[in-house]
Each structure stands twice: as structure tokens, then as C-alpha cells.
Amino acid sequence: MQLNPKQVRGSWDDGFTLDTHIRSSDFIGYNEYGHPQFDTTRIELGELLYSLKYKADQSSVAPIAQAVAGFLRSWNPGIDSIVPVPPSRSRPVQPLFQIADEVGRLLNFPVDKGSVRKVKEAPELKNVEYAKRLELLGGAHAVDANASRGRRILLLDDLYQSGATLNATARLLKEVGGAAAVFALALTRARS
């Protein structure tokens, strides 16, 4: 799979996104309910992620995890464990957790899905400005310092839009959790 990694700066020690999520999205009109419709073309990784999240296509897990594992091998940030960002919405099966588990299996790293947990609901952040996102995320997560203290953690997310969720979570892991280092990796990034 062809990737276009981009370094991103934030409250972490180093971080990347693997590629953009969407190649193009053209407005094509309104549906019968007056909702705007778009003809969207995603990059390969974006399409796999979309298929996993919204079509429950389990065959997408392996190629996504292989792409992540290949990138981590070349980046080599020296991590102790993988911590997936807690999901923003509840699903019977969490796609990011599936990806993290498979990456952990491929690279023989423990995956810690419990050290950062959601403790209050935050509204969907899609159309919210950055400062307001950070405000809404305040107190939304808690960290188990016993699980993160002194660890070098890879914080894994599926989509990087503004970086607010990754920043808030990375700060929490460092300041409250006592993590020795936090590295951020988002599978895809928004175009703007």
C-alpha cells in the first residue's frame, strides 16, 4: 500500500499521520431530504478504514494493520505499548481496537485498551473549532497511572482532523499518567 506520511506536532514527543483520508469530494446536489450529497474518492487506506468503520468489512483489518506495522518498523520510536484512543461513539466492535490488536500481534507489542478511558460523553467534534474542541474534551478521559507510568506509549487514532483529541490524551498520559514518552500516530488525516 502506498502511504504519504506527514509529521504532526503536538503534546507528544513525535507524531505522524499515514495519509490523507479523502483524495477528492465533489458536491453533486441534494437528496430528496435536502441533504447535500458528494462524490467522494478516498485513498486506499481511507477506503479500507471507511469500509471497516461503516460497512463492518472485517477483511480491512489485516491490510490496515500491515500498513501501520510497516510504518512503525521504519519509524521505530522505541515504544513499550500501544494505546488506542477511546472511541467517540459506542459500537459493538470497535474498529480502532481491532486494528491496534492486530498491530500489536504483528509487532509483538502489548495493546492497552484500558489505561485511557472515557469518563464523560463529549458531543461529536466534527464541526467544532479547535479551542472549543479542547474545552469539550476537558475531563472527558481518565488515565490509569499504574498502567502508563514510565512507559513509552504509542497513542493510536484513526482520523486526525485538528489534533485536539490526540493532544488532550497525550497531555493526560504525560501529566497524570506519568508516561515517559508519548508518540502519536493517526491512520489518516483530514485534507484541510
Image (cartoon, grey):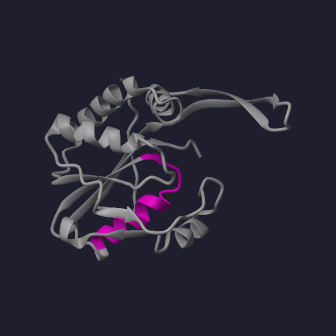
In the image, is 40 to the left or to the right of 8? right
Q: Quadrant of the N terminus?
A: top left
Q: Main secondary structure of the magenta part?
A: helix
Front one among 147 and 36: 147
- Asked if residue 180 can be seen in this view, the reply is no
Above or below — where is 138 with respect to 33?
A: below
Establish if 58 lies above or below 19.
above
* Residue 167 magenta: yes
Q: Is residue 86 left or right of residue 178?
A: right
Closest to the observer: 45 or 137? 137
Rendered location of residue 46, percent (x, y)? 48, 32
Q: Residue at x 86, y 31 (%)?
A: 32
| Rendered location of residue 114, percent (x, y) | 29, 59
Q: Is residue 120 magenta?
A: no
Which sits in the foreground, 180 or 140? 140
Q: Judge whether 78 appears above or below 69 on screen.
A: below
| Quadrant of the rendered image containing residue 182 | bottom left
Residue 91 vertical position relative to residue 172 in the rendered view, above or below: above
Which residue corresponds to the image point at 51% horizontal and 51% vertical from the top-left?
89
Image spot of residue 78 (x, y percent): 15, 51
> Is there any visible trace of residue 27 in the rendered image?
yes
Q: Which residues are magenta?
A: 158-174
Which residue is found at the position 22% from the left and 63% from the top? 181
Number of dots carrying numbers: 0
Locate residue 4, reporting x and y percent. 40, 34
